[in-house]
Amino acid sequence: QVQLVESGGGLVQPGGSLKLSCAASGSMFSINDMGWYRQPPGKQRELVAMITRGGSTNYAASVKGRFTISRVNAKSTVWLQMNSLKPEDTAVYYCNAKISTLYGSNSDYWGQGTQVIVSP
């Protein structure tokens, strides 16, 4: 059974920084794209950033230049470095990975979510 375990959320003042991490574990053939999504209060979940196995990245316009996604394939881990945080970054952040296992190829797996609150 595959699990994604996140850590690193919390309360931070505007202009501050946080780093989220997400580690995948379990029986996996390969991890393909990995990414971070967020769901602000009362809104739909949205893509924040994603990174391919080869290291290509894509960011939402609202976070470009402030957030950096990275991964280490050998550790099955993805990080999201968040700088210059704004109150509108407040959300539950979810890790996502497309993973191939014995039971299916490129299936979506999600972490449990970690709360990020940006407030004075």
Image: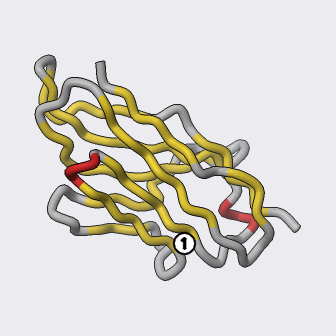
Q: Secondary structure at mark 1?
A: loop
The location of residue 19, given as percent across then percent down, is 55, 61
Q: Residue at x 72, y 45 (%)?
A: 41
The location of residue 75, given as percent across then percent down, is 28, 48
The residue type indicated by label 1 comes to Ser
Residue carrying label 1: 62
With 11 as the anchor, is 115 left or right in this view? left
The image's colour scheme reads secondary structure
Q: Residue at x 59, y 51 (%)?
A: 8
Image quadrant in which the N terminus is located? top left
Image quadrant in which the C terminus is located? bottom right
Residue 25 lies, with reference to residue 114, above or below; the image says: above
User: Closer to the camera, 107 or 7?
Assistant: 7
The location of residue 37, given as percent across then percent down, is 48, 50
With 82 as the anchor, is 21 left or right in this view? left
- Specify the quadrant of the image occupied by residue 56: bottom left
Q: Residue at x 37, y 53 (%)?
A: 78
The location of residue 88, given as percent across then percent down, is 71, 64
Q: Residue at x 27, y 57 (%)?
A: 72
With 48 as the anchor, is 98 left or right in this view? left
